[in-house]
């Protein structure tokens, strides 16, 4: 008998965030693994997924929370007074958050689908689907809470850690999730260990479901003007948050060019993604390095994935830290692209754990000299044969596949749920 999975998710719009891309890939692979999937999503637009039933949860527009959220939004816009921190300190979350949660709860109460498993997925710092299912006790014995990142924010590793208004309410919320959800899932082993150190029940309920390597069909195969496929192209695609400084990569690339001046004519470094916290350093290096193309903004996933598949090297850039428990959502895209990954991450990181301790193309994010040496090694290999830079990691392809996902879902200790 085909098992039924109800997925409750924030967004299935792959253009709005890396989290949504990861969620859609997981949903698609659940379908490919043979499960019957119904998706309740709060994207607020009608988005269809191939062969999968989706329902766009409508927003409640007649509630007290809705009125208050709009009222204070107008006050903030017109008088430049932000009341959100005050209310979050008192209640833990915003009026908008509570109205969104109630909208999801209302929709779930009306649905007639009888799932064997209820999977909540979220993005960023939202966790609205988790809050909604937490308020529906009749679903708890079927509930798997997917935890994509640490929460609350003050549980992030340095240098990310900061304290939000209402942090104590958020702690209570997540402790309830850890205790009420029959199962929990994490994209990485290190994240499960990290969160279990704060909420011990995750150690008992948690399984690892990595970001999925779902197939994506590129719609437009025309290269943009900034990309020359005949060159040795190093690509970093993704937001450069404040805690992800690109300076070491830029210095490393610059050093490589100075040591190998003949490489200037056939090499390029491409950075695609929001980088508002690093405009000064990017402006400086763009003057220093004509071979650098940096786009501070969003490109379509279709364009980015086309470049990832045709670049020589894909960069995964993480923070300077003692540990990085995250599995970046683009890790799966890089594996699918089948190009060498330049991993700039802490020694203790999920990316490095998966690539392996003997993987040669790894460095701390600020080790410019080592980065330059790695780039030179890769360039020399590329000159001999561009195909030698294919990743060719069947073990990672299998780990991120629908077949592996099916095995995880169907493990013996899971069989009473589905």
Image (cartoon, grey):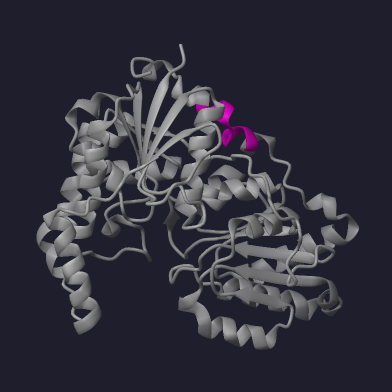
Residue at 45 percent across and 24 percent down: it is 409
Extreme residue in the top direction: 1
Q: Is residue 47 left or right of residue 255?
A: left
Q: Is residue 156 above or below residue 293?
A: above
Q: Looking at the picture, tell me which residue is in the foreground, 255 or 386.
A: 386
Q: Is residue 128 left or right of residue 191?
A: left
Q: Which residues are magenta?
A: 397-405
Extreme residue in the front direction: 62
Q: Is residue 10 above or below residue 254?
A: above
Q: Quadrant of residue 296?
A: bottom right
Horizontal and vertical percent position of residue 262: 87, 77
Extreme residue in the left direction: 90
Q: Is residue 90 left or right of residue 84?
A: left
Horizontal and vertical percent position of residue 415: 38, 15
Residue 294 painted magenta: no
Residue at 54 percent across and 71 percent down: it is 297
Residue at 9 percent across and 61 percent down: it is 90
Quadrant location of the C terminus in the rendered image: top left
Tally the marks: 0
Residue at 18 percent across and 40 percent down: it is 176
Horizontal and vertical percent position of residue 289: 70, 83
Overall secondary structure of the magenta section: helix
Regarding residue 103, the answer to whether it shows in the image is yes
Horizontal and vertical percent position of residue 217: 67, 45
Q: Looking at the picture, tell me which residue is in the foreground, 406 or 50.
A: 50
Q: Quadrant of residue 375?
A: bottom right
């Amino acid at each position: 008998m085909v098992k039924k999975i109800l997925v409750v998710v924030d967004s299935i719009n792959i253009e709005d965030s890396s989290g949504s891309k990861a969620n859609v890939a997981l949903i698609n692979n659940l379908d490919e693994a043979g499960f019957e999937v119904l998706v309740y999503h709060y994207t607020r637009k009608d988005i269809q997924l191939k062969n999968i039933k989706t329902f766009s949860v409508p927003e409640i527009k007649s509630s007290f929370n809705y009125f208050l959220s709009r009222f204070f939004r107008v006050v903030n816009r017109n008088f430049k007074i932000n009341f959100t921190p005050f209310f979050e300190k008192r209640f833990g979350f915003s009026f908008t958050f509570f109205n969104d949660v109630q909208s999801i709860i209302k929709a779930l109460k009306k649905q007639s689908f009888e799932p064997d498993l209820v999977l909540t997925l979220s993005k960023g710092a939202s966790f609205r689907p988790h809050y909604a299912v937490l308020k529906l006790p009749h679903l708890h014995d079927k509930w798997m809470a997917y935890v994509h990142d640490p929460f609350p924010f003050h549980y992030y590793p340095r240098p990310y850690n900061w304290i939000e208004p209402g942090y104590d309410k958020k702690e209570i919320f997540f402790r309830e999730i850890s205790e009420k959800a029959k199962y929990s899932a994490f994209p990485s082993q290190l994240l499960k260990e990290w969160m279990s150190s704060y909420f011990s029940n995750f150690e008992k309920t948690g399984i690892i479901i990595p970001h999925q390597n779902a197939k994506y069909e590129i719609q437009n195969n025309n290269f943009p003007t900034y990309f020359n496929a005949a060159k040795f192209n190093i690509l970093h695609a993704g937001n450069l948050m404040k805690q992800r400084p690109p300076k070491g990569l830029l210095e490393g690339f610059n050093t490589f060019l100075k040591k190998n001046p003949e490489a200037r004519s056939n090499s390029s470094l491409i950075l695609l993604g929001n980088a508002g916290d690093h405009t000064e350093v990017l402006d400086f290096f763009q003057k220093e390095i004509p071979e650098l193309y940096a786009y501070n903004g969003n490109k379509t996933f279709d364009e980015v994935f086309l470049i990832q598949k045709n670049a020589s090297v894909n960069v995964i850039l993480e923070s300077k830290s003692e540990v990085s428990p995250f599995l970046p959502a683009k890790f799966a895209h890089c594996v699918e692209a089948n190009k060498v990954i330049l991993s700039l991450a802490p020694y203790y990181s999920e990316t490095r754990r998966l690539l392996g301790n003997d993987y040669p193309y790894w460095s701390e994010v600020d080790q410019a000299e080592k980065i330059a040496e790695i780039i030179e090694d890769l360039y020399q290999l590329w000159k001999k044969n561009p195909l030698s830079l294919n990743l060719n990691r069947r073990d990672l392809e299998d780990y991120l596949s629908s077949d592996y996902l099916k095995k995880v879902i169907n493990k013996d200790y899971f069989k009473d749920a589905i």
